[in-house]
Amino acid sequence: MKIHLSDEALAWFKDEMLVDEGEYVRFYVRYGGSSPLHDSFSLGVSKEEPIEAVKTLKKADRTFFIEERDLWFFDGHDLFVEFDSKRQEPAYEYKKA
């Protein structure tokens, strides 16, 4: 399982979440909503330092990661983070690894 992040999505994290160089962004499982992989669970995002990161992507000196306890959510899929220009926010896609 890998994390993929487009340049446009990176710009959104820099501008909207104010993620500076050397900072971390966590993708995590949250109860509520839904996703193509699991009903009643969706993907959350927060700025925080890792505890047990098992998947990481470093881009423009910013680290995006997934913790061990959230890995089940991805069910063998890669996470693709793109930018939805109509909604002006990140869009998440899961592709079988």
Image (cartoon, rainbow, N blue to C red):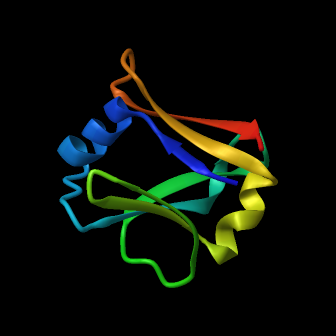
The residue most toward the bottom is 51
Q: Please name the residue shown 56% across and 50% down the image.
A: 3
User: Which residue is at a point 56% across and 62% down the rendered structure image?
Assistant: 28
> Is 53 positioned to the left or the right of 46 in the image?
right
Q: Quadrant of the N terminus?
A: bottom right
Q: Position of residue 49 (x, y in %)?
A: 37, 77
Who's the residue at 23% across and 68% down the image? 22
Left or right, 81 with reference to 1: left
Nearest the viewer among 76 and 29 is 76
Task: Give the image quarter of residue 12.
Answer: top left
Count the labels in the image: 0
Q: Please identify the quadrant where the C terminus is shown.
A: top right
Percent x, y of residue 15: 18, 42
Image quadrant in which you'd find residue 16? top left
Q: In this picture, is 34 found above or below 62?
A: above
| Residue appearing at x 47%, y 31% in the figure | 82
Residue 50 screen position, x and y as percent:
45, 78
Above or below, comparing residue 96 to residue 24 in the picture: above
Q: Is residue 58 above or below residue 81?
A: below
Q: Is residue 16 left or right of residue 24?
A: left
